[in-house]
Amino acid sequence: MKYPRKNEAQSGARSPRPRKEGFRPKHQERRGHDTERHKKFPTTHIVEGTIRITAKGVGYVRVPDMPEDIEIDPTFLNTALDQDRVKVVLHGKQTGMRQSGEITEVLFRNKTRFVGVVQEEGGSYFLLPDDARMYRTILIPKEKIGEAKMGEKVYVQMADWTDSKKEPLGEVIKVLGQGGVHNVEMEAIVLERGFDTTFPQEVHEAAENIPTTISPEEIAKRRDFRNTLTFTIDPKDAKDFDDALSWKKLPNGNIEIGVHIADVSHYVTPESILDKEAVARATSIYLVDRTIPMLPERLSNGICSLVPNEDRLTFAAVFTLDQNGGIVDEWFGRTIIHSQKRFSYEEAQEVLDKKEGPCLEALLSLDALAKQIRDARMRDGAIAFETEEVKFELDANGRPLRVYRKVIQDTNKLIEEFMLLANKRVAHLIATKDNRSESVFIYRVHDAPNEDRIRDLRDFLHGIGFELKLGKDGAVTSKDINRMLKDVQGHAEEAMIQIATIRAMTKAVYTTENIGHYGLGFEYYTHFTSPIRRYPDVMVHRLLQGYLDGTPVPKKVLEEQEHLARYCSQMEITAADAERASIRYKQCEYFAERIGTHIEGTISGVTEWGIYVEDKETKAEGMVHMRDIPNDFYFFEEKNYRIVGKNNKKIYRLGDKVSVTIATVDLKRKLIGMKLA
């Protein structure tokens, strides 16, 4: 099976000629190019890679096994767009200069649909793309403009573009509405990243055809927990309930805890219409005010959701724990449950705090066990990064009235620990089976940090009076990271060191090759607990059932499973980007009404062109440009995470507290400009 991203298309072959300008609206700035220094370089080598294009139109091609990305001057992009797979001819490399090159062929077009604003000039219509990395406007023939009006935000399908002398052509496939309107902007964020906001009719029909009743034959195949105390704990605005906990005290004092997960794989079978749609989406997307689900709502909020007072099919990891949180026994398999209570995190926390209310004994027991499990996890090397999320109170038109930080309570941590335990033990079960070398599984892995980054972090810490011990091979253990983070607690530099350490970490991904999870300190880890919103969890459920049935997936499908795992990793990143974009847009809207406001913040980033400052209350991030810092000229010291005044020697460094004023807000680009107060 091929697992394409939504809306992607292949590009045709093309000539490697330098671009000549075709139609270019008057508003569109011509970029100057330093072409002379390339003309004298001989063609020496051809490579393939994926191109990343900046907002300034400069490309950088990443090629496996090359020490640095290849820089592509805008003149030599030759129709390549951001994230395309391309063929590059390398220019001769001069000493002290980055390797440069020219795109000769687009092998795979990553994206062909764009959101933007319709403009008209001289009788010609064109799209001004929202994405700053799309460096060309898209011409829209009059017969392809549809019902779109001048100034409206639209969604455009770009035709095959192979001639860089001409602007690409496109067709309006959806009119979103006027920019600045809440629903328009939220839909634009999702569509721009290639996700559909609605399901095809045949997918809805497939979901409607699923029966709601559970047959006696199906119940007989499962372990029945309907008479065991079971409940869910979720955000107060949640609708898709993936997980439930069952609790039972055994005669010997041990506790039986069931982590019951919605049995999506029972309803979504391989190669079905529902499955293909779930594969294409790979994940749900959570914006500030809505969810774009991976599955139709009849499944995600209905049949699969573990709502109270209804029988539900589940896949469970059931643990018998002693009073210290140690595992005495464990069982994995399909279950049926009947949740007696739906808690929000706040409601469950109130029961714990007041020590009265429904399910009190179970909640107190689970909370105590979760804390013991967490303590053991920290001792074993899990890295304890503290991150904060923001929430929004919106008016009827979607404009932000208030921005506030999400409060993490003991009940949040309670659920987290039992989900982590289930994920860990499912992966352990598979990885340690006798036939593990003959079959396939999907792991969630997190590699150790890059050694160069860790050495830079060590040197930085040493320079400000803290130590990070490295092994003889230059590596660092998660326990060493935790020890260092504990040492800096309470110091003025704590925030700065937290930020620098997080940025030294790699990203977690899905793969068939287990290398462990560095950040959690786990030798084996997977994602089992959220199949309503993550496709890898559906894969894990199917693979796990195969092992339990004695029919594991054979090695011959390894390549297909690995391809799908990588695809899901990329879609996860894209969905997270959409979620962050919706947050940034609302933060910008909030401060657009508060120009001139003084705020207290923390320097969250340092670059050659200025410092980023994060507001303490709203977590909004803005830029103080170097040119706007008064009374001196400042130099950027990358390895020291700081800028330093040439004459006054004043230092601004990562993690410093500063007072700033909101100076400008650019809603289109989702940027906040700040000045030091």
Image (cartoon, helix red, strand yellow):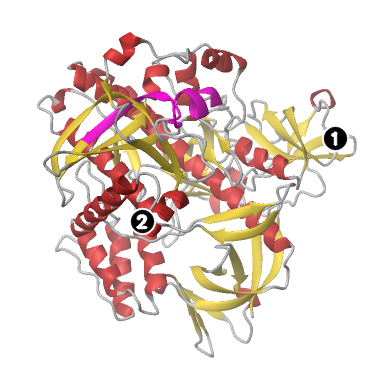
How much space separates mark 1 and mark 2, taking CA atoms? Answer: 60 Å
On whether residue 304 falls in the magenta region, the answer is yes
Number of numbered tags placed on the structure image: 2
Q: Does residue 276 sit above or below 227 in this rendering?
A: above
State the residue position of label 2.
Answer: 355
Horizontal and vertical percent position of residue 463: 32, 79
Q: Residue at x 18, y 49 (%)?
A: 325
Q: Does residue 397 sit above or below 190 in this rendering?
A: below
Look at label 2 and name its amino acid: Lys
Horizontal and vertical percent position of residue 33: 64, 53
Q: Which of these two is toward me, 102 or 264?
A: 264
| Left or right of 643 in this view: 196 | right
Task: Return the mark for residue 149.
Answer: 1
Which type of secondary structure does the marked residue at label 1 adopt?
loop
> Marks 1 and 2: which is nearer the front?
2
| Left or right of 317 in this view: 4 | right
Please provide the residue range marked out in magenta. 297-318
Q: Does residue 546 sit above or below 491 in this rendering?
A: above
Q: Quadrant of the C terminus?
A: bottom right
Q: Which of these two is toward me, 575 or 358?
A: 358
Q: Which of these two is toward me, 139 or 145?
A: 145
Horizontal and vertical percent position of residue 233: 41, 43
Q: Quadrant of the N terminus?
A: top left
Q: Residue at x 58, y 62 (%)?
A: 620
On whether residue 259 falls in the magenta region, the answer is no
Q: Residue at x 40, y 23 (%)?
A: 311
